[in-house]
Image (cartoon, grey):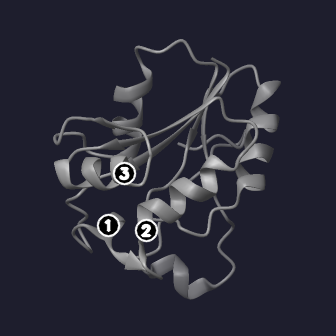
Amino acid sequence: MKAIGVIPARWGSTRFEGKVLADLLGKPVVQHVWESAKKAKALDDLVVACDDERIMKVVEGFGGKAVYTSVDQPSGTDRLAEVVNPMDVRIVVNIQGDEPLVKPIMIDNLVMALEDEKVAQMATMVKKIEDNDELTNSNVVKAVFDKNGYAI
């Protein structure tokens, strides 16, 4: 398999327990993410990596593919790694389970960028912070990069 998209989705979110199942315009947030990511042409497979039966049932209920991961995983990246480590896959795209506005073209562009990449095998989409207030907002997820542009 060349490219897989993994949507880490845990029940015990620190700021909003169960947020991936929160209703957004009549559907759970994770379903919006799945439906958008499923439209990406560059992915060979897509899976939700979850730690809770409620998430598993909802994902299977809308026709998605889900696998259980350990509830002890400290991060979405660890949850993702648990899923893909036994697989023979070249490119792994970490698609945030609480990002319902992800666009398929974003995923496709990311996979295309990684196709010729010699070092990185996994990626997460990020957006540059343009509002200084977001720098100190603990509700805004941040990424730090090394001098080569790799997330630390």
Q: Is residue 138 visible?
A: no
User: Pointer 3: what residue?
Assistant: 59
**Circle nearer the N terminus (3, 1):** 1
Circle 3 SS class? helix
The residue depicted at 61 percent of the width and 69 percent of the height is 101
The residue depicted at 43 percent of the width and 68 percent of the height is 29
Amino acid carrying label 1: it is: Leu
- Rounded to the nearest angstrom, the CA distance separating label 2 from label 3 is 11 Å
User: Pointer 1: what residue?
Assistant: 21
**Circle nearer the N terminus (2, 3):** 2
User: Pointer 2: what residue?
Assistant: 29
The residue depicted at 31 percent of the width and 56 percent of the height is 58
Amino acid carrying label 3: it is: Val
Crowding near the residue tagged with mark 1, few <14, some 14–19, many ≥20 C-alpha atoms within 10 Å:
many
The residue depicted at 64 percent of the width and 19 percent of the height is 90
Amino acid carrying label 2: it is: Val
In the rendered view, would you say 21 is above or below 135? Answer: above
In contact (CB < 8 Å): disc 3 and disc 1: no
In contact (CB < 8 Å): disc 1 and disc 2: yes
On the image, the x and y values in percent for residue 150 come to 64, 40
